[in-house]
Amino acid sequence: MNLLDAALNKQNNLNGTSVQKNEQVAQNNAIHAHNLLKWASDTFEPVSTDGLIKPDRPQRSYIVDDPFYMAPINFLNDIKENIINIKNGIQGKSNDHDLGRMNDFAMKAGALGLAGYLFTRGKSARTKAMEFVGFGAFFAAMALWPKLFIQAPIKAMYGLDIHQRYVDNEGRKKMFFQDPQYIPWNLYTDEELSALGDRLGVPKDVHNRNEVIRKKAHKIALQGNTLWMLTAGFATPLFCALGCNGIEKLFNPPSEKSGFPRNVIYAMASSIEKRRIDKAEDKVKNSAAIASKKLEKYEQRKLNALLGMYKNRPIDDELIEVIAKELSHDSDLLQSEYVSKQIKDIVKNQSPSLTKDYATRLYSYIMENIETFDDDVELNVLADKKAQIEQLAEKSKNLSGFTNSLLHYVDNLDPDNEELLEEVRTLCNDFKAQNSKRILTIDDIEQLRVLDKKLYEFSIKKQLLDHYNLLYFNNAEGTIAANRWNNVSKAFFNSLGLSSEEIAKAKQGEDAAYKLVVEKLENLAKDDEAYKNAFSKVYTAVLDFDKTVLPDAPDGTSQGIKSILEKRYTTLFDEYAEVFDNLGFSKIKERLVGGNTRQGCLKDNVLDRISRRINELRNGMYKFLQVLDFFKRAGDIEKEGQSSANGYLSYRASNGLDLKATKETLMSDIAKYKALLVKGTIADYTTKSGLKNPQVALYDRMMKYIFTTDFADSTKEILGISDNAAVEQAQLGETTFVKTFTKKIQDTLANLGNFSYPHAEKVTTLGVSGGGGDILVRDSLAGPRIDRVVRETASEVFNTSKWLKMFGGATAALIGVTLLAEVFFGNLKKHDVYSKKDKR
Amino acid sequence: MISAVGPQNTKKIKKNDGFYTTPELEKAIHDSHAHLVSGNPLNQSRIQVDKLFNAMTVYPAKGLTGSPNSNFYEFLTMGTVPYLVGSAMLMAVFNLATKYFEPNQAKHARELGHKMALGVIFYGLMKSLSKKFIEVPVYLKTGVDINTPYKDMKSQLPEYPGDKEGKKSVEYHKVFESVDFPRWDLLYDYKKDKPRNYYYDRVAENMGLGKDLPASDQVAKPKIREMIIRTRTWTTLTSYIWAGLGVALAVQDGWNDLLTRKGGGIVKRTLSMIKDRGKGFGEFAKDAFLDTKEAFKTSCKQLYNGGVNNSKLKALAGRAYIYTAVGTTLAGIFMSAFDFFNDKTEQDESKIDYKDDYTVG
């Protein structure tokens, strides 16, 4: 009998002791057992299993949400992590995830470097900026395509975000569904999974529903990612190209309707343009400091090398040319022929100077070359006379005196020998001629060096000023002239309102363009409001140029760029003309500012070029206005003719026509005028549009009607020309431009006296005075051919719209296919949803 | 009897009683698990072609149908498709619309478009080629080919109930594609007649870790891993710089003559030759090769000297680009092949003095 049994009250009645005694024993045993247990539980601590079973690591992974407003913070975090990544990679401490991320970073960094290089090759501010726009657009397209057309539609259709991210235990952010065979479903609680299943449309009464939900989500995600891989190649370039195309439009000048961002971007582009000009202007103002700094560094290395090489060479034309080429730093500036003239002036040939050295050399020369004596040396009377000849040289005053006294001396030595005398005379002259070709002296070299330095200084200053000039007026992309001209021609083109079929027709050739232009302008002329709209748009663009070029204000407060440039150039040229003159370089001065000769000087050339260029631009712009106005006038005539019985009266009267001239004649006249304006060139003015002698009168009428008649009423409204002098005075600055040009054209183009004309005596001039007979001025006044301008602009517009249609269509097709494919995702087969029941 | 050897080895195996192996049996066993394949350029090209073919046909089909056998390897392999398709698309964007333009404008547009297309081609070429600039010297120094390929046979799950079991698909991986879990096991028994650790012996000797080491694999493995990480870092960084340099070379004016000269640029001539069914191919090929060489030389000079006008800014940019590319590559070669970050810890030092007596108490 053991204690336990006793404690459990088990009785083992073997000896047949009395029940009472057994009960007592049992009770005692129970007490003993109880005490034993109590002792055990008091002595030993309760054992905790906390330290015995390895605990589960706390789950540190979780699903993340990436709201778009965290993007900047994520961006900065990414940069920091990438730097740490690279450091670890170089040391050899990365893991797979870091190496994968490094690839993305390296791709972006490499592309940025490439964009930076291509930036240096950009020809204008706009093309330069577009390099970085392209960089941004490409990576934006790469990121946005899956977000907009894969992730978002699938989320809308099925309620599942296939590009959801999570953070794993090591703190790395990964895509949840990236690896189809290792999806961390443990991050979803049962409730969340069930909610997902509801969204996915998994029936609620399916056995093992969680498994089905997981299968369906896996399938949709797998299909979505595969579709992403297949379409990304097509989508990224298309989106990038379309995006760049759209952003480029923002760089165009804004119309009245456009607000943000077009206005802002155009303002930025204008301010960049302005800053460029300001910088160039600052450089011009500091040109003295810049030139002196450059002059300090200027070592005249090439010139020194030249001079050293040719130091003992007798001066001749070839040498002068070589030196002149080196000295004329900017060949456009002075052209080496003028510098040659100056150098010739410096190294004027002089007679050799009479020195003892000269006498000695003359003596040796004579002794070497004399032929009168035979080998019989004794007969040579001059044999030992060197010292005497040198004495003669010292006594004589000049070279010719010395020659005479030498000849006298020889004569005295050998009186009867005429031959000897002649020979000595000849030899003396030869020797003198040879030594007249002197070599460069130290003074010459010094003067050349000074000339070189001054020319260098002048060329630096002129280059800075030229650069400033070119920013305004050069015939290149990105200059003020180019931008403003584009604005004007685009405004004119847009006012025609061509549809896309008409644009396709217009680009084909000038004939088609001409017909369309005439048709559209006639339509414009019929409607007052539309005409005023169109005219004011073109006029605004023209004024923009004029204001940028800033005509001088009458009271002298502000100055136009023309007078600023003229003043600056004049100052520069005059200053340096004086400098060169003071240094004794008169030929250079003549070249710069002109002198006694009638040859043109550089200053005049430069100033002339500026005004010619400005006129060219203004004339071209004015032509658009003139064409619009003329068509309006013609349209008014036609309207007038339709409304009254005495139609066309004003036209007939103002043109001195026979009042009986028919409507057809008048309108056919006007059609000819339209042709001249729209597709005529300067040749047409010269040849009178091919009109033969009897039609001289027609040409007279043409010139009168086009150029001397007053503007149309609507035009006057916009230009602010009115009968009220006060109103006109207020608008003075703006109308001056138009008025000046009207007058100029009258004086020049319409003045028949300016053109050679076969039957001049039969011509009646228009009675205007003045000239302007310069051929180039006349050329620029005729302006560009409108039909050509329209054809070229139509071509550009057509090209862009064709490209857009092609690739916009491709993008739309791609989006359509993608969205259509997504409709068929996630179809689980029956065996995925319902499993066979086990037969048990 | 060995069963399920997969589609690769369908040759009938001679039956035996199972105690002895035959060479065919050995080979069948070997081929049915992951095994190294030759890493020579021809084989690498074959692997690339195989992967590309699958990436365009088999893997998208599996992915779009939601097959349970579509795994991460297939997803990554499909990642090459956007590169190729995207390159072709980029070239198309610049060139397809040109034929609708007016002749004069079309000429200028074509010039630009062809240059862009050339840039795309150079980008791809230089990106893959420039990795070799670092990997080959590293291989020559250490004996480790970072692109060592192996062929794996993955068992496929049945796609539907009743699907035939035991299908296998072939996957081409690289031994070192993962730096956390490289397939070290495949590098033992590298050569048949050499010791088991031959590969690690050789690498340890090349890396300067010691000769005739008793356990060269233990010593070499961490060092190889670090070297792989360094090489991967440098190749990633430099490949994009070289790719950009390729594009910079393609936009130089030296290519104008080749691409758009009067009488037909290289593209037009190639197409017309193909249309003529290869007539005059020898002549064409020689001309094309010489013209391309000439254009390449001129463009390189222009890139270095700053374009046609020897502009200073462009010359500076071009030279900076070239020097960056060459400099980082050289730095990469040295930093990858040699270990400059060898941090010895205290644990590497032995604390036991062998000369002393120790008693066990």
Image (cartoon, coloured by chain):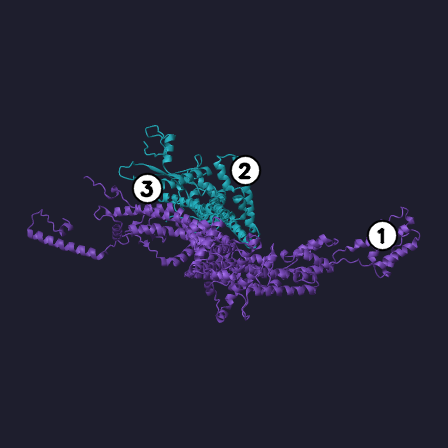
Q: Which mark is residue A169?
A: none
Mark 2 vs mark 1: tell me if same chain: no
Q: Which residue is disc 3 drawn over?
A: B69
Q: Where is residue A811 in the image (x, y as percent from the top left)?
A: 39, 48
Q: Position of residue A300 (x, y in %)?
A: 66, 57
Mark 2 neighbour class, 10 Å CA radius: few under 14, some 14 to 19, many 20 or more: few
Q: Where is residue B261 in the image (x, y as percent from the top left)?
A: 54, 44
Q: Which residue is disc 1 drawn over?
A: A426
Estimate the spatial distance between the alpha carbons at disc 3 and disc 1, rounded to whole Å: 114 Å
Disc 2 or 3, which lies upstream in sequence? 3
Q: Position of residue B297 (x, y in %)?
A: 56, 45
Q: Report the chain shown in cyan.
A: B
Residue type indicated by callout 2 = Lys
Relative to A361, is B50 on the left or the right?
Answer: left
- Quadrant where the C terminus of chain A sits is top left
Q: Nearer the observer, disc 2 or disc 3?
A: 2
Relative to A790, is A582 on the left or the right?
Answer: right
Q: Which residue is drawn at 40% across and 57% down?
A: A75
Report the front residue among A725 and A173: A725
Q: Quadrant of residue A44?
A: bottom left
Q: Which residue is disc 2 drawn over?
A: B286
Q: Are marks 2 and 3 in contact (CB under 8 Å)?
A: no
Q: Which chain carries label 2?
A: B
